[in-house]
Amino acid sequence: MEDKLVTLAIRTYQRAQMIKAVLEENGIDTVIHNLNLEHPEMAVGVRVRIKESDLPQALKIVEEMESAWEREPATGSTETPQVLIPIDFAEQIQKVTDFGFHFADIMGAEVVFLYVYFSPAFTISSSNDMSTYSISDSELLRRIISSANADVENMTNLIHARIEKGELPNIPFSFELKEGVPEDQILDYCKKNRPVLVVMGTHGRKLSNGMIGSVTAEVMEACVSPVLAIPELMTLQSTDDIKRVAFLTNFDQKDLIAIDRLISLFHSDKLELYFIHASDKNQAWDEVMLSGIKSYFSNHYPQLTTNYEILSKADSPELINKYLIKHQINVFAFNTRKRNIFSRLFNPGLAYKMVLHSDIPLLVSHV
């Protein structure tokens, strides 16, 4: 039986070419699909395809390459802290803008809006699956860029007007327009500039049954910066409504640092903090640990109301979401460890699952 081709990764053209070169050096036949022959450097959504039998070896090689890219020193980093707001000019952009400006004001940061657009391509597949040809419509591309620039100008004027009315804090803001795959461009920007927070919109449960992937979920799984996801259907009207915050802890020492930052970010005289631990096994020591965490933060932050609870099943987005709804939680926060490409491909993490199962804002940090 013929060894069929499978998609190993979807990357920008430059990254795809680098992956292809290294794989072929290791004896793995590699094909790039959706290649824009007229302007290859402008191609987006480029698919790196290999034979299915080569998948285990190729995954290991690509994981090592991406780990090396992540270890590269950040370039172009700025002294002024940044809050990054990726946008697509959707209806929920006002909510994301409001939250982004609020937290930027608290953190003494400037706001950077990042808009990533696709270059158009009409793809014609030949009978041989090893090659795909595409023709770029340069006029359509010019229209996309022109429309994006017009949207940026309109939004700039709107933000200035809202600042003058006192609806938004008067802090610096700017726009970045980039061509490419949204999640790749967002992650690359964060790697180079290290924003203190990324604020993104998400459709939440609305697309949980029909959506294979989510840009916000992909970013939350791999971003070096903390990511705050704002669901389209969330009930919060403003940051002033944040009264109850839940934090999922695995009793890692870094959780204490994350919780301290969380309290600083959502500072309120009436903030209620809920500590959650999810475990498949009922161990008495878990409750001792949770009680200790509660006591620690009660002593250091006497103005807080603290609670804790053990959930009976680990890594269950449905169970966690029921708990959040029951206790009227406004923001759900947790740390997540950076996962390799194999894990992200075949076993999505809790951040990914919660984006598709909840209409409650999520704050995710990597440890």
Image (tube, rainbow, N blue to C red):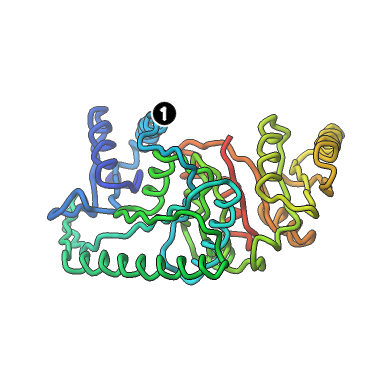
Q: Position of residue 343 (x, y in %)?
A: 50, 40
Q: Which residue lies at the image location 35% right of the left edge and 44% below the top edge?
A: 8
Q: Which residue lies at the image location 63% right of the left edge and 60% below the top edge?
A: 358
Residue type at mark 1: give it. Answer: Arg
Nearest the camera: 34 or 91? 91
Residue 6 horizontal side relative to residue 311, left or right: left
Q: Is residue 91 visible?
A: yes
Instruction: For label 1, count other residues whose C-alpha is less than 10 Å away and answer few (under 14), some (14-19) or many (20+).
Output: few
Q: Which residue lies at the image location 39% right of the left edge and 44% below the top edge?
A: 189
Looking at the rendered structure, the secondary structure element under dot 1 is: helix
Nearest the camera: 7 or 85? 85
Up the image or down, 309 lies above or below 359; here it is above
Say which quarter of the image contains residue 248.
top right
Nearest the camera: 156 or 230? 156
Q: Position of residue 294 (x, y in %)?
A: 83, 40
The residue lying furthest to the left in this view is 38
Q: Is residue 282 visible?
A: no
Q: Position of residue 330 (x, y in %)?
A: 70, 59
Residue 325 horizontal side relative to residue 23, left or right: right
Q: Quadrant of the C terminus?
A: top right
Q: Which residue lies at the image location 57% right of the left edge and 59% below the top edge?
A: 99
Q: Position of residue 213 (x, y in %)?
A: 46, 56
Marks counted in the figure total 1
Q: Quadrant of the N terminus?
A: top left
Say which quarter of the image contains residue 34.
bottom left
Up the image or down, 194 lies above or below 96; here it is above
| Residue behind mark 1 | 71
